Amino acid sequence: MKKMDSKLKSFTAHLDEQYGEKGAETREKYEEEFEAFKLGVMIQELRKEKGLTQEALAQKCGTTKNYISRIENNASDIRLSTLMRIIREGLGGHLKLSVS
């Protein structure tokens, strides 16, 4: 049997090492950017499930293809009202938020 490599560590330990522990400024920045990335991927997946191009989604919710592309690739500066309009009018869904 092969021994486990003692250099392996958990993802949390990796994040602690790379960005500092939770609460550290660099870790908070990483977490915010990761949430923005997840939001962009979610919008892209929902758009594709609905069979919409970026242009078609933009037209449905009153924005531009370029703006939809920016959101899908890095959603860090999206306004809540715009996000709600994209979800509601463009994708036919409802936005639910939670704080943890």
Image: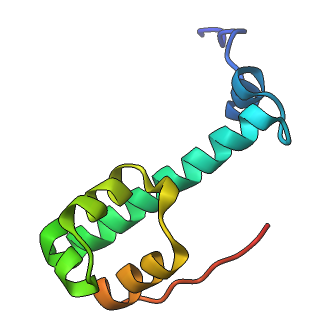
Q: Is residue 3 above or below residue 38?
A: above
Residue 23 position within the rendered picture, expressed as x and y whole percent measured from the top left: 85, 42
Q: Residue at x 70, y 76 (%)?
A: 98
**Does residue 98 appear in the picture of this structure?**
yes
Residue 66 position within the rendered picture, expressed as x and y whole percent measured from the top left: 22, 59
Between residue 17 and residue 87, name the one nearer to us.
Answer: 87
Q: Residue at x 76, y 71 (%)?
A: 99
Coloring applied to the structure: rainbow
Res. 5 image quadrant: top right
How many marks can you see? Answer: 0
- Judge from the rendering whether residue 28 lies leftward or rightward of residue 68; answer left or right: right
- Judge from the rendering whether residue 22 lies leftward or rightward of residue 91; answer left or right: right
**Does residue 53 appear in the picture of this structure?**
no
- Judge from the rendering whether residue 31 lies leftward or rightward of residue 82; answer left or right: right
Image quadrant where one finds the C terminus: bottom right
Residue 60 position within the rendered picture, expressed as x and y whole percent measured from the top left: 21, 86
Between residue 49 and residue 79, name the one nearer to us.
Answer: 79
Residue 53 position within the rendered picture, expressed as x and y whole percent measured from the top left: 14, 69
Q: Is residue 1 above or below residue 46?
A: above
- Judge from the rendering whether residue 66 lies leftward or rightward of residue 41; answer left or right: left
Res. 58 image quadrant: bottom left
Image quadrant where one finds the N terminus: top right
Q: Is residue 24 above or below residue 83?
A: above
Q: Residue at x 72, y 9 (%)?
A: 6
Between residue 9 and residue 73, name the one nearer to us.
Answer: 73
Q: Residue at x 40, y 85 (%)?
A: 85
